[in-house]
Amino acid sequence: MKKFLTSVLAVGMAVSLAACSATDSSSSSSNAGATGSGVEDGVLTVAMEAAYAPYNWAQPTDANGAVKMKDSELYANGYDVMTAKKIAEANNWKLEIKQLDWDSLIPAVQSGTVDAVIAGQSMTAEREQEVDFAGPYLYADIVVLTKKDSKYASAKGLSDLSGGKVTSQTGTIWYDTLIPQIPNANRQSAAESAPAMLMALETGQVDYVVTDMPTAEGAIVAYPDMQIVDLSGGDNFQVSDEDVNIGVSVRKGNTELKDKIDAYLKTQTKDDFNAQMAEAVKIQPLEHN
């Protein structure tokens, strides 16, 4: 997902994701023959946007265990940083974090500029043509977020959302796959980032947005006038594992690194993931325009 605007879920950085789109496959094939895990030097280099709370964000200090980013005066924190730290610790690696915009993430891992991407990426079949995924390291349910005073706040199913103005982040399954499941939805132009998507809702440009549960939970902490719509009483989104499974991407064919990351992730349960996300939501920055 990406391009940017400072707000609730980010501290002055650019460009965001959750669950987002793939890149040119020609780059994938050119790097498929590369060898080595990339961590022979004992350093795990991880890329993320640092602009997509509660998954990842940038902050000015090392508060709450934040990690200084390479070639930056800022520190990265969030669910993805917590995960990266634990993977590195489990393998006795040092951790290095690089901030890249969304469209640069997959090319960076394909070229070997970074070892892995931990950035809220959905494990889609399209992406798996270009990178390999370890994980999942989170299961992110799809939800609808609206304002508490909206007529759509009482919706019981997708049919009750009919006619409403809706958007989501560009290049995501939310915008491309899930909004079309809402009958007669008035789909607006895609937002360039998750913060921009939330700002569109906050300022009344749209009636509701489609996103994932962690993003929505982070949003309602920062925007108390928003709420998650309970669609359990009616027709709901039809989703597959690739819509909700969030993974760590590594270079295609890098089974050594993938296996080491998976070895740690397999020690964690869904409850562990959810508890870690709750902590990320708790410490996320709340500044927004």
Image (cartoon, rainbow, N blue to C red):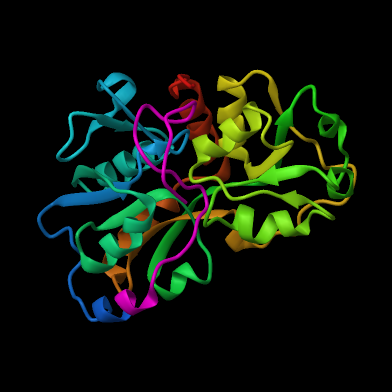
- Of residues 232 and 99, the one drawn nearer to the viewer in this rendering: 99
Q: Which residue is pictured at 18% across the width and 29% down the height?
A: 73
- Of residues 192 and 61, the one drawn nearer to the viewer in this rendering: 192
Q: Is residue 188 left or right of residue 152?
A: left
Give the quarter of the image for residue 117.
bottom left
Q: Is residue 187 magenta?
A: no
* Image position, residue 132 (x, y; %): 39, 68
Give the quarter of the image for residue 10.
top left
* Image position, residue 236 (x, y; %): 81, 51
Prevailing secondary structure class for the magenta stretch in the rendered image: loop
Q: Is residue 40 left or right of residue 248?
A: left
* Image position, residue 200 (x, y; %): 61, 34
Instruction: Single out the residue that lies furthest toward the left.
Output: 41
Which region of the structure is painted magenta?
1-28
Give the quarter of the image for residue 222.
top right
Q: Is residue 222 above or below residue 268?
A: above
Q: Which residue is pictured at 43% across the width and 22% down the height?
A: 285
Q: Is residue 10 magenta?
A: yes
Q: Is residue 14 visible?
A: yes
Q: Is residue 272 visible?
A: no
Q: Is residue 272 left or right of residue 216?
A: left
* Image position, residue 214 (x, y; %): 57, 37
Q: Is residue 187 above or below residue 66?
A: below
Q: Is residue 103 above or below residue 82?
A: below
Task: Count the numbered circles shown.
Answer: 0
Q: Which residue is pictured at 50% across the width and 55% down the height?
A: 20
